[in-house]
Image (tube, rainbow, N blue to C red):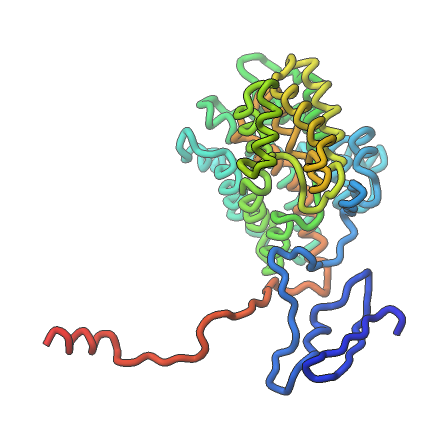
């Protein structure tokens, strides 16, 4: 077999030929490698899935060494420059970009599902005034499961399509309501004459005016950010979506679990950490001293480096360009000057080059969100809105994949060997009392 690996088990002297497909071997093929009939068989040990593929997917392609990101084969740079977020959502879900008729009909269907049930609005009103918007979002998404019990039939394709449209339509509404709740402002109903991001901005910031006119530059910037965050292969939250979805939980519950994973500071909360770092630096004059502290191991350089990318994150390049357009509207942000100086130092310094620490998507996105008027607690919510499309696409692929079963990783047991209980605790207590 030319596409195979020949292994010899030095424990037994036996040899095995394992087929290689798509640059991988199947983990279950290792189970035949045993020392004897009682042996369970060989397993792999891979904490955090650093080198384990859990699925086959045709959605997103990443080449971290070359800084490449593609959705369904299309470079992220082209999609961000030439497409709307909803068209990219269609691409991810259906495999091809929509034609003009499909684009119009798809946008209409999503607008139709932007409203949320009044009882769900009351549910959100039950949170404390200072509740974290991400906690409100994931709880409300989970609550949606009770409003649409038919969503439990995950094998029904028509039902799946309906739940997908509902979630894409309702996520901005839920996010905006969480934002307004924090500020003590009345909720604003969707305006379905507006585009996806313009409608979201209206629900966020409309006050007493009859109609909110979103700044087109800010609406476009948000649309681009949504495209960049729509999917990113098998990251922590996507893996969670697939793991929970593998139990055939409905998409609302699965997506709530994925949102919980996203909420962690090592995942979706990273851009908030960047802002905290820039606040700590304070001014341009402190940048070099801060870099020296990073190199001395006294603090971390947030927004640099990535588990996958060992080159410049292609999304970061696009966001940097978008930031320049946003600041023409919002005014200059002193944090941007500090960020640019940090980037320039890191790209020239051998310490960072050797460690392949390049700016990632979080480095500039938080600065843009803050300039647009969002407080840091909203950043992860803004991440969750577009990533909903990626989660649902991955979930849809999972449900249709005949090879997938309920997720159930193995473990390597490191505890005690068999041992036995001595005198029962109760009897011992009685004898001591006597």
Query: Residue 320 is drawn in which quadrant?
Result: top right
Could one spot residue 64 in this view of the protein? yes
* Residue drawn at x 69%, y 19% as measured from the top left: 326
Q: Which residue is at the front of the view, 21 or 103?
A: 21
Quadrant in the picture for the C terminus: bottom left
**Residue at the far right in the pictured view:** 2
Quadrant in the picture for the N terminus: bottom right
Q: Residue 325 appears at what percent x and percent y? A: 73, 18
Q: Which residue is at the front of the view, 87 or 223?
A: 223
Could one spot residue 162 in this view of the protein? no
| Vertical position of residue 397 compared to residue 9: above or below | above
Query: Residue 13 is drawn in which quadrant?
Result: bottom right
| Vertical position of residue 189 compared to residue 313: above or below | above
Q: Residue 7 appears at what percent x and percent y? A: 77, 75
| Vertical position of residue 240 compared to residue 262: above or below | below
Classify residue 29 as left or right of residue 385: right
Q: Which residue is at the front of the view, 301 or 212?
A: 301
* Residue drawn at x 82%, y 60% as measured from the top left: 22
Q: Residue 127 appears at what percent x and percent y? A: 42, 35
**Residue at the far bottom in the pictured view:** 37
């Amino acid at each position: 077999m030319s596409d195979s690996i020949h292994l010899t088990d030095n424990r037994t002297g036996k040899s095995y030929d394992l087929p290689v497909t798509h640059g991988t071997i199947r983990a279950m093929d290792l189970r035949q490698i045993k020392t004897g009939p009682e042996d369970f068989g060989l397993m792999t040990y891979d904490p955090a899935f650093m080198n384990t593929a859990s699925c086959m997917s045709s959605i997103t392609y990443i080449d971290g060494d070359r800084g490449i990101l593609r959705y369904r084969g299309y470079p992220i740079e082209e999609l961000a420059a030439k497409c709307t977020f909803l068209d990219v959502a269609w691409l991810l879900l259906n495999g091809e970009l929509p034609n003009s008729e499909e684009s119009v009909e798809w946008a209409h269907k999503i607008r139709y599902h932007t409203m949320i049930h009044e009882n769900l609005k009351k549910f959100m009103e039950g949170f404390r005034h200072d509740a974290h918007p991400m906690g409100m979002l994931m709880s409300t998404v989970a609550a949606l499961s009770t409003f649409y019990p038919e969503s439990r039939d995950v094998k029904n394709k028509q039902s799946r399509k309906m739940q997908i449209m509902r979630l894409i339509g309702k996520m901005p509404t839920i996010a905006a309501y969480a934002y307004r709740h924090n500020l003590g402002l009345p909720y604003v109903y969707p305006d379905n004459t507006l585009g996806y991001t313009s409608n979201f901005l209206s629900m966020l910031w409309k006050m007493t005016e009859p109609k909110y006119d979103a700044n087109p530059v800010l609406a476009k910037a948000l649309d681009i950010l949504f495209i960049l965050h729509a999917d990113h292969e098998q990251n922590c939250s996507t893996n969670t979506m697939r793991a929970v979805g593998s139990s055939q939980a409905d998409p609302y519950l699965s997506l709530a679990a994925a949102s919980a994973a996203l909420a962690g500071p090592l995942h979706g909360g990273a851009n908030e950490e960047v802002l905290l770092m820039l606040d700590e630096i304070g001014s341009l004059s402190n940048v070099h001293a801060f870099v020296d502290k990073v190199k001395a191991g006294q603090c971390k350089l947030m927004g640099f480096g990535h588990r996958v990318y060992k080159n410049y994150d292609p999304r970061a390049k696009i966001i940097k360009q978008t930031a320049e357009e946003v600041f023409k509207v919002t005014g200059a942000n002193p944090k941007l000057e500090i960020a640019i100086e940090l980037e320039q130092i890191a790209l020239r310094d051998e310490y960072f080059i050797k460690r392949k620490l390049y700016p990632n998507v979080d480095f500039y996105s938080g600065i843009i969100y803050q300039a647009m008027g969002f407080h840091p607690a909203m950043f992860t919510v803004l991440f969750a809105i577009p990533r909903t499309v990626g989660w649902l696409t991955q979930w849809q692929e999972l449900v249709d994949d005949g090879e997938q079963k309920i997720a159930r990783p193995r473990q390597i047991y490191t505890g005690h060997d068999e041992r036995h209980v001595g005198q029962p605790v109760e009897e011992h207590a009685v004898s001591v009392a006597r």
